[in-house]
Image (tube, grey):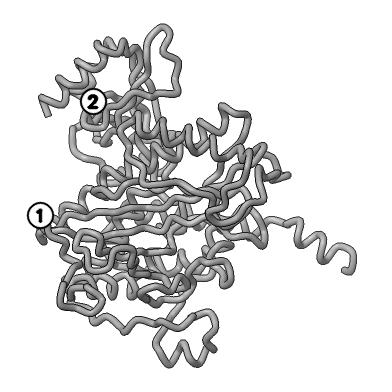
Amino acid sequence: MNEDKEYVLEQVEAHNVKFVNLWFTDILGYLKSFAITVEGLALSLDEGQGFDGSSIQGFARIDESDMVAMPDPATFTLLPWRPQEGGAVARMFCDILRPDGTLYSCDPRYVLKHNLKRAAELGFTFYVGPELEYFYFKSDGLELEVLDRAGYFDRTPRDEAIDLRRETVLILEQMGIKVEYSHHEVAPSQHEIDLRYTDALTMADNAMSYRLVVKEVALRHGLYATFMPKPIFAENGSGMHTHQSLFREDRNAFFDPDDPMHLSDIARQYIAGLLRHGPEITLVTNQWVNSYKRLVPGYEAPVYLSWALTNRSDLIRIPTYKPGREKATRIEYRSPDPACNPYLAFAVMLAAGLEGIENEYECPPPVERNVYEMTKEEREALGVGTLPPDLLTAIELAENSQLLKTTLGEEMHSKLIENKQIEWDEYRTQVTSWELEKYLPIL
């Protein structure tokens, strides 16, 4: 830690840094930030920086509003899009403490760290690789004017978004965030930039940075980028398919060279845990009313609790890009969307998988048929359940989930349920344009 602090102070001097942004998220995954000047940096690295937590969703009640943001020096990096004249700007992610120095249990970064510690006690390191999809629009208004009419992997001439993606990737790499590849997605004006597989805490930090960089680059060009799960009716929504694996030191615990699918018993138990607990963790992986407009049949989003080797209609897919290669063996969990809180999403997926391992859940056989084309009776005969169809159902499942209470902690679990119930009540009392168009002329 002392070496990291020394490195930060050296970098600040070398790059003429004047301001350091301290970043953290609230329960819902909104990125929060306040800036300190370089003169106060050394003290902040030692003691943290006090701030008023009463205005941050879920962070404190009004009568206990004092909080401390403790910078993590390992996350220090310059913000390349900020002006350099008069002093550069850098950022660090923070852990949130109470004034007495104890870790705050409702800090999402703490929740992920706590669950990673549980994995470490079992001998595992958790690695993830999310695919965050998003849309570009010409403004943030209600017109939703797209930049292109291209499709999956299309390379069109004079595609404005190609340059936007290129600029985004270059900035991410300047920040030390490694990128695998980028491409056009299925829907018009929909795109994806995939981050290089790494440990879950680093990836959660990277995902928060990635979402901001995508939006910053779009704004620089007079455009708007959104990670809203389903902004366009009758088009594919945006997902955050999450590749994941457990390693024991440098060995992949999901790999078995003697298994026909190269999956170990641990991998199958992990899959079983996700299938069993998938419905109750969906409130975290898909936390918005709009999330459930994406989770419908026909738009490449999973609805059914099944797994398969190659079938993209299932909740869990086993990628086969490099069959038989140990380090490439992983599972892909396909329901999360990119508007989730990545710290909490990674935590609950890990917790569900570990539950399967610790309790040796039996993994059902893979379903290689298209689940969407089955009858309800066929799915029931195979024991294939469904994800919650709307936010209300997700709230009800999560409210009674012991797994979620244990994973998030009682206090955060309670705050999340309360917040989502308010959102549902606000939504269900709205009169939408669909209702007016359908009913007003005839009723």
- x, y percentage for residue 67? 30, 31
Tell me: residue 215, above or below residue 282. above
Work out whether residue 376 or residue 58 is closer to the camera in this orientation and state it. Answer: 376
- x, y percentage for residue 44? 23, 21
The residue depicted at 63 percent of the width and 60 percent of the height is 235
Tell me: residue 434, above or below residue 356. above
- In space, the residues marked 1 and 2 are separated at their CA atoms by 32 Å
* Element class at badge 1: loop
Q: Which residue is mark 2?
A: 48
Tell me: residue 282, above or below residue 345. below
- x, y percentage for residue 242? 36, 58
Where does the C terminus fall, quadrant-wise?
Answer: bottom right
Give left or right: position of 269 versus 17: left
Where does the N terminus fall, quadrant-wise?
Answer: top left
Closer to the eye: label 1 or 2: 1
Q: Residues within 10 Å of mark 2 (few under 14, many from 20)?
A: many
Q: Which residue is mark 1?
A: 249
The quarter holding residue 80 reads top left
The residue depicted at 21 percent of the width and 21 percent of the height is 8
Give left or right: position of 173 versus 406: right
